[in-house]
Image: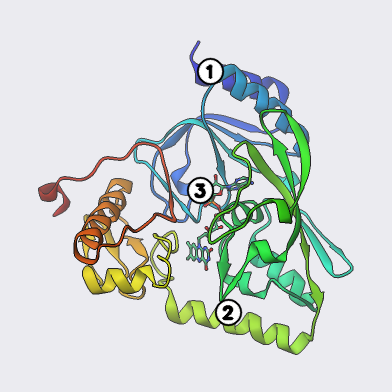
Amino acid sequence: MSAADRAYDVLHARTHGRVERALPIGPMTSYGLGGPASVFFEPATPEDLPALSAAVAASELPLLMLGRGSNLLVSDRGFDGIAVRLGAGFRWTRVEGSAIAAGAAVPLPTLAVLSGRHALTGIEFAIAIPASVGGAVRMNAGAHGHEVGEALASVEVFRLEAAEAETIPAARLGFSYRSSDLPRDAIVTGAHFALAAGDDASIQERLREAREWRRANQPLNLPNAGSVFTNPPGDAAGRIIERVCGKGMSVGGARISEVHANFIVAAPDASADDVYTLIRRIQRRVKEEAGVELVLEVRLVGQFEEVPDGAAAR
Ligand SMILES: Cc1cc2nc3c(=O)[nH]c(=O)nc-3n(C[C@H](O)[C@H](O)[C@H](O)COP(=O)(O)OP(=O)(O)OC[C@H]3O[C@@H](n4cnc5c(N)ncnc54)[C@H](O)[C@@H]3O)c2cc1C
C-alpha cells in the first residue's frame, strides 16, 4: 500500500470531509496552473482535523495548506503530498462589539466589507487582497502601509503534531514583512481581529480608495499571484525589475506584467515551468546587473524545471 493510499484510507474512514486521490489543485490557485496533489482533503469542520494528524503520521507525506491559492505556484508535476483546503465549517464570522472573529476560510475582502457595515476600522486596507484569513495570517498580508498582524488579537490554530487546538495571542506570532513565526505544524482555523469604532463615511472612503488603487496599479485581467518577490529593504522589487529586465520580458506564456513589473502574468498557454523559469531568469539578471538578491514572496509547491531557451520560444 502506498503512502498516499494510507493517508487516503485514514481520512476517508475517520472524517466527514471530502477526500480525493490525484486531484488537480492548480485550478484552486489564482494562477490556475499546475498538477494534482497525491491526496486532497477538505475537512468539513474542526472535528475532522485530528484524523489529519493521524493521516500525516501514517503516511509521512508532506502537507500543503491551501488558502485561496493567491500566493502559490503549483508545479506542472503536481504535489506529492496531502493538500488541505478548509471546508464550509471554517467559513463563519462573528461581530463582538468592536472585534470580529472569523473562520480561516473566510475571504479577507468579506471581512473588510463586514467591518465597514459595522462602522469598524482597522482592516479596510484588506478589501482587495484576494486571500483567505488563514493564508493572510501565515503571510502577514498587507497593503497601503498596514498588515494583518497589526489588526489581530489572537489566532486559533490546530497543531498537527500534538493533534490539538490552541489559541495563540498575536503578540507571540512574530509578525514581520510578509512573514510570521506561526509554527510550521500550525493550521490556522480562525482569527480574532481587534478593530475600533470609526466614522462610517471615512471607512467607506478608505474602502473605495483601496479598490480604486488596485484597478489603477495591478494587472487584473490575466492570472497572477500578486507580487512575485518581496521588496528589498529601502527599495521596490518592481522598480528594480523594470530597470534591469524591462516590462514584457517573457518565457513561453509567462511574462512580466506591463502594469506592474513585480507581477508575472500567465497567458492561457502558460505552464508553471514557464513562470518558474521567468522567476529564475529575473533573479539571475537582477543579481548580475543590480547586485540584489530578490527573495520570493510567492510560494513554490512541488518540483520545477527550467525551460530551455529554445523551447521557451514557442
Ligand atoms: C491580484 C493579487 C493581488 C495581491 N495583493 C496582495 C497585497 O496587496 N498584499 C499582500 O500581502 N498579498 C497580496 N497578494 C498575495 C496573496 O493574496 C497573499 O499572500 C495572501 O496572504 C495569500 O492568501 P491565500 O489564502 O490565498 O493563501 P495561499 O496562497 O493559499 O497560501 C499562502 C501560504 O499560506 C499558507 N496557508 C494558507 N492557509 C493556511 C491556513 N489555514 N493555515 C496555515 N497556513 C495556511 C499556505 O500553505 C502558504 O504557505 C495578492 C495576490 C493576487 C493574486
Q: Are marks 2 and 3 in contact (CB under 8 Å)?
A: no
- Mark 2 lies on residue: 210
Cα–Cα span, label 3 and label 1: 22 Å
Question: Is disc 1 surrounded by few (<14), some (14 to 19) or many (20+) residues within 10 Å?
Answer: some
Which of the two labelled residues, at mark 3 and mark 1, occupies the earlier sequence position?
1
Q: Which of the four quarters of the rendered structure image does ligand 1 lie in?
A: bottom right
- Mark 3 lies on residue: 28
Position of residue 301 measured from the top left corner of the image (x, y, whole percent)? 43, 41
Camera-nearest residue between 137 and 49: 137
**Residue 305 as seen in the image, left or right of residue 301:** left
Residue at the (72%, 88%) spot, across then down? 202
Mark 2: which secondary structure?
helix
Instruction: Say which quarter of the image contains residue 34.
Output: top left
User: Which label number is shown at residue 5?
Assistant: 1
Instruction: Say which quarter of the image contains residue 302.
Output: top left
Position of residue 290 measured from the top left corner of the image (x, y, whole percent)? 24, 66
Residue at the (83%, 65%) spot, across then down? 99
Which of the two labelled residues, at mark 2 and mark 3, occupies the earlier sequence position?
3
